[in-house]
Image: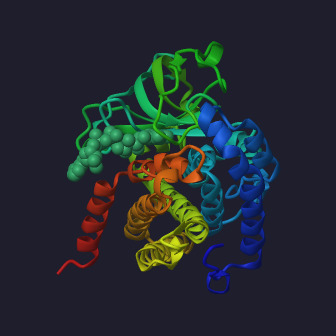
Amino acid sequence: MAVDTAAYSEQTEIQRDITQMVRQFADEQIIPNAEHFDHEDSFPEPIVEQMKELGLFGVTIPEEYGGMGLDLTTYAMIVEELSRGWISISGVVNTHFIGSYLLMKFGTDEQKDYFLPKMATGEIRAAFSLSEPEVGSDVQGIKATGKKAADGRWELNGQKMWVTNGLGSGVVFVLVKTDPKAEPPYKGMTCFITEKEPWAEENTGDFKGLVVPPKIKKMGYKGVESTELVYDGYMCPAERILGGEEAGVGQGFVQMMDALEVGRVNVAARGVGIAQRALELALRYSQERKAFGKPIAQHQAIQFKLADMATKVEAARLVTRKAARMKDAGERSDLEAGMAKLLASESGKECVEECFRIHGGYGYSKEYEVERLYRDAPLLLIGEGTSEIQRMVIGKKLLQRHKI
Ligand SMILES: Cc1cc2nc3c(=O)[nH]c(=O)nc-3n(C[C@H](O)[C@H](O)[C@H](O)COP(=O)(O)OP(=O)(O)OC[C@H]3O[C@@H](n4cnc5c(N)ncnc54)[C@H](O)[C@@H]3O)c2cc1C
């Protein structure tokens, strides 16, 4: 830790042990190998296999289903450590975590029994799909549809966009319109739990009608795949509607927005992790590099940058943990999750930029880690709702809570 705040971070013994374990894992397994997988844009399979052994796919899944049964706060601490290593690694578990949250909160007993044990071990990974080629922020504008067929199953059609884990996942929680005429539109939206063959570009048998086009080429956030998904006559059994057909039809929007609240804490934790790493790299480089006869860290302008970075890291970490703790305590945390996501993702980008400046020309070289951070950090401004959308959420909730 560049700034040792351990004494003030209010961690339980379990949280301390697990974050230390994940930090060691990041130092020994993620950071030394991230450059290779980033450069090749290949899936970091060996790292993911070790994460399965460490139980990191089941952190929040209850013990009765084979998980660790830990809370969102602990999960956020783990995500921070993973992201300090490489945000793509946290991306592999992020949508998986959201999928397990959806099942735990809204799933039927059969859905939980069927999916959660396999998800806890990482045997199957989950993806979460709202976005479409023409729609991201304005979720109620999606066009994919689900229509009940004569045999009782539901036929899904439509194109989805930017699906993290789109190819390697074994299950996708997908939002479609089951009543395109519903007013307001969110009342006509349903979440389907669509199974698929992991790593198959064209699904066959029970899962036919789901095609995964080649992965999208990205600026950063490499290694973990982002894909489109094409549902073309995919037949989904009625018992795969989240919460069951009777309770689940028309509830998809509400369910998925609920999940986004925890997803935002998760992205906030990633922002803290990448900001922390940028601070560490900047502290090290600025004491090694000399200019005008002394280490650049001795120039006040550089010290001010370090001071601002450290302050942002601390603030972002505190607001992220507060949002997580409120959710764990069963309190409404939509406002706080929005603030955490906004502050931590912007802080992540700002700290990475300052770290880049401190590295001078070497920051532009692929030999230095900050070059990867510079390409990775902007994603956090976009995923799980852009900064503009967070401000809209925060503003709306503020006015609701302080109505005169
Ligand atoms: C690498 C990556 C991975 C992703 N993974 C997933 C995933 O797993 N699942 C998934 O469903 N989605 C995923 N997404 C999609 C992501 O959630 C969307 O990109 C994001 O919600 C923004 O939507 P958009 O790209 O359509 O932008 P748009 O909604 O078109 O927005 C464009 C711009 O307009 C602004 N804007 C929009 N509406 C308003 C408004 N009312 N007021 C002010 N400004 C506004 C936005 O802030 C933004 O600046 C991923 C995206 C990326 C890049």
Colouring convention used in this rendered image of the protein:
rainbow
Left or right of 40, for residue 332: left
Q: Residue furthest front?
A: 293
The N terminus, quarter of image: bottom right
Q: Residue at x 56, y 45 (%)?
A: 95
**Residue closest to the eye, 250 or 97:** 97
Q: Residue at x 52, y 48 (%)?
A: 371
The C terminus, quarter of image: bottom left
Ligand 1 quadrant in view: top left
**Residue closest to the eye, 362 or 4:** 362
Q: Can you give x and y, in whole percent of width and height, for residue 11 in the image?
A: 68, 79
Residue 249 can be seen, yes or no? no
Q: Is residue 262 above or below residue 243?
A: below
Q: Can you give x and y, in whole percent of width and height, for residue 82 in the image?
A: 65, 56
Picture quadrant of residue 274: bottom right
Q: Is residue 187 above or below residue 176?
A: below
Q: Can you give x and y, in whole percent of width and height, for residue 67 in the image?
A: 75, 54
Q: Residue furthest right?
A: 53
Residue 297 can be seen, yes or no? yes
Q: Is residue 375 above or below residue 272?
A: above
